[in-house]
Image (tube, rainbow, N blue to C red):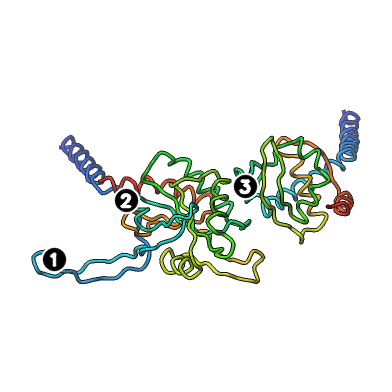
Amino acid sequence: MRKLVLSTLFLITIATMIYSCQSSEQLKQDIYYANGRDLYIKHCQNCHGSKGEGLNALAPPLTDTVFLKENKEKIACFIKNGASGPITVNGKKYDGKMPDFATLANIDIAQIVVYITNTYGNKQGMYTPEQIAEDLKNCR
Amino acid sequence: MKFNRSILSAFLFGSVVFLASCQDQKKLPILGPREAATIKNADGSTSVDTVYKTIPAFSFLNQDSVYINNDTFKDKIYIADFFFTSCTTICPTMHRSMKTIFDKYKDNPDVMFLSHTIDFKYDHPSVLKKYAQKLGVDGPKWQFAYGSKDSIYKIAEKDYLVAVIEDSTAKEGYVHQGWLILIDKQKRIRGAYDGTNPEQVAQLTRDIPVLLAEDKK
């Protein structure tokens, strides 16, 4: 009986260790996602909405998964430097101005990108501050 | 005897319920400063009455470059606020809330909306027009008012009791409060709700029918 209990405990411990090893990447992404959500509520939600639905023709929604995928490396530029001029999202044309959030650090922007590209029907995984730094070099 | 007592208590209980139901329906408060004034009655005697704060006569250009004034809102209740089109902080949230109410009362001619811009430098009527179109509310029901700095800032602070400031140290150049002000048909202030707070906006949504019912009597 004692052997059985001990071996069960041993197995559970091993399983937990393996599980936590596997999900450390996932854990990091979850942390980014949660922090990104807080930053989103603070900086983005008033225009883009609590469900990423946008605001009529004033602010585009964040639900266009294709747009987000194709323009992923531009998102950092949009956030850091602001954006203006016509863009087409969900087949609708938007011609407004987005303010810059120049004070946000790369890690903040990475967290926002992880949040918006993994919610509202998007599922694009992790994005790192290093990638943001790279993206910001190529801003037009 | 015991039987009688229970009948009596049932009767008392019933009459209390009956009396309570006779009371006036819920009424919204009348906000703002007030003063007592002596008025002359028809028979020559005098009595004292309360004079409530009302929105004075105004005249602003709207999004169609047409002058609007008090008469535009005659016999209407309306919701007023102060904003500017390039504002990206509280204004989108305020107008998201207002638009929800706008959509709800789309077909009720008794309810109107009035947004004053405090950006007298940039928000000319043509800019307001574009903004209204983009918000999807362009029409006579929701008026966007443009006026001189003096006139808008004065009516904001003295009459609607909303603080608005031109502040060069603020990122967008202006600082203002996000109140949605509910005005009744007698031009009195009947409510002020923080347009960025969902609970207060819900309260406004509940208060509009109360105010509308009051005028029906």
- For the residues marked 1 and 2, what is the alpha-carbon distance in whole angstroms? 26 Å
Tell me the residue that label 2 is attached to.
B75
The chain letter for the residue carrying disc 1 is B
Q: Is residue B193 visible?
A: no
B18 or B162, nearer to the observer = B162
What is the crowding at mark 2: few (fewer than 14 residues within 10 Å), some, or many (at least 20)?
some
* Circle 2: residue type: Asp
Residue A58: mark: 3
Q: Amino acid at mark 1?
A: Asn
The image position of residue A16, as x and y in percent, is: 86, 37
Q: Residue at x 76, y 60 (%)?
A: A102
Q: Earlier in the sequence, mark 1 or mark 2?
A: 1
- Looking at the rendered image, the quarter that the N terminus of chain B falls into is top left
Nearest the viewer among A13 and B18 is B18
| Left or right relative to B37: residue B169 | right
Find the residue positioned furthest to the left: B43
Tag 2 secondary structure: loop
